[in-house]
Image (cartoon, rainbow, N blue to C red):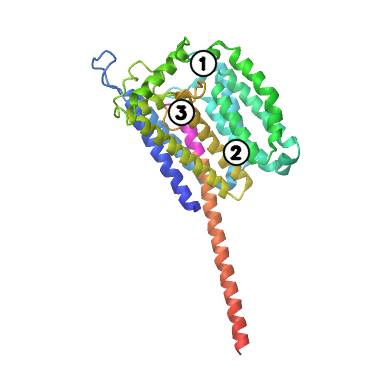
Amino acid sequence: MTPRWLRLQLWLLVTLIACFGLVMIASTTTMGIGAAGREAAVSYAFLVKQALAMAVGAVLAMVISSLGAQRLRSGWLIAVVVLGALGALVGVLAIGREINGAKRWIDLGPINLQPAELAKFALVVAAAWHLSRVAERVRSNWYGVLLPLAGFAIVAGLVYMTKDLGSVVVMAVVLGAMLLFAGAPWWYLLGVSVPCVPALLYVTVIQVSYRRDRLLAFLDPWNAEGPAAYHLRQSFIAIGSGGLFGVGLGQSTAKYSFLPEKHTDFIFAVICEELGLVGGLAVAGVYLLLVVTGLLIAAQAKDRYLRLLAVGATVVLGTQAFWNMLVVTGAVPTKGLTLPLISYGGSSVVVCLCLIGVLDAVAAANVLAAKRNLTTTRIGAAVRSEKAWRWNEGGAS
């Protein structure tokens, strides 16, 4: 597949997902009938805010893409991104707004900034920069691995203090994938994971009551008690009500005060109810195609840094998308992760589009590299043809 077509395919998929996301935000939030059957006022506030966030994200994506491959590797630019994310994480702990018991947002008037989303973007660019610089040392010794792990521990600790374990899990998966793509031996990661993961699970899940309840709800949602089990049961009911082809767009009943977080973390349940199994599989298929497109863009990159950038951006989007769908269908324990470009949430939408901008920048560099290779090939062929003609002319004379 040519670099130019991959770039076009990337934007076609993003546009399709974003437009569908706006449709689903409208479906889940602009309800015309109340839970008791009475007419209710229709509000488009969520839809307008989501559309504005998408507009801001699209502008930032185009800015990032227009910076070009060389500027994206600039040390000062990466330092600004990392320091900005760290500053926002520290700020949210001091002045953050608490919602549902979690202090994850900074109130900026018309918008709420979620620093954990910025941390994911910062992790991708910083890890790609470091791993491209240490190069062979990632493969041959611990130095190339320990520094990113130490940086991750600091960022992950700050994110965890905002009670956002889901984002920590995503960042851990992303860093692990980038280390493997950079050539780090798998036993390095295994040597760190085997002793650390069980201890961290015990401290962060077993010892925390509401996360322990989520785990119990995942193991037996129909008999467990508490909000987590109720949430999962309502999700199952919504999905089951959709059947094969769904009850029709906008016709969900679960969204009427039955299914919590219907327009954010559990919007996929409403998609399955309204569009059925076919619609749910179609959404999963589009995300899978987006991941494949991102990995193909990474594979075509000739530059190590750009290749790692594309891998990191793709893994963030893919991990969030498929973890969200697995949570909603009860395949994994509940974590507060949005469905990229579909779930309501300004910070998530903006950062996801910024990651698309990174992918587009890499794709654009691939297009330019392909043009240079084609030009070089044509010039070489012309020179060889000229030499052959002269030799033949000399031989004929």
Q: Spatial distance from mark 2 to mark 1, Cα to Cα?
A: 40 Å
* Magenta residues, start to end: 344-355
Give the mark toward the camera: 3 or 2: 3
Which label lies toward us, 2 or 1? 1
Residue 394: quarter of image: bottom right
What residue is shown with label 2?
Answer: 77
Quadrant of residue 86 within the rendered picture:
top right
In reply to whether residue 116 is colored magenta, the answer given is: no
Q: In the image shown, does 116 or 253 lie closer to the viewer? A: 253
Q: Is 64 left or right of 342, judged from the image as shown?
A: right
Q: Residue furthest right?
A: 141
Q: Crowdedness of circle 3 by 10 Å Cα count: few (<14), some, many (20+)?
A: many
Q: Mark 3 points at which residue?
A: 325
Q: Is the stretch drawn in magenta largely helix, strand or loop? A: helix
Q: Is residue 265 above or below residue 99?
A: below
User: SS at mark 3?
Assistant: helix
Query: Which numbered marker is on residue 214?
Result: 1
Q: In this view, does 284 lie to the left or right of 188?
A: left
Q: Does 317 appear above or below 234?
A: below
Residue at 40% from the left image edge and 21% from the top image edge: 236
Which one is nearer the viewer's eye here, 6 or 79? 6
What label does residue 196 carry, if any? Answer: none
Which of these two is toward me, 140 or 275? 275
Q: In this view, does 386 lie to the left or right of 11?
A: right
Looking at the image, tell me whether mark 3 or mark 2 is earlier in sequence order.
2
Q: What residue type is labelled 2?
A: Leu
Dot 3 or dot 1: first in sequence order is 1
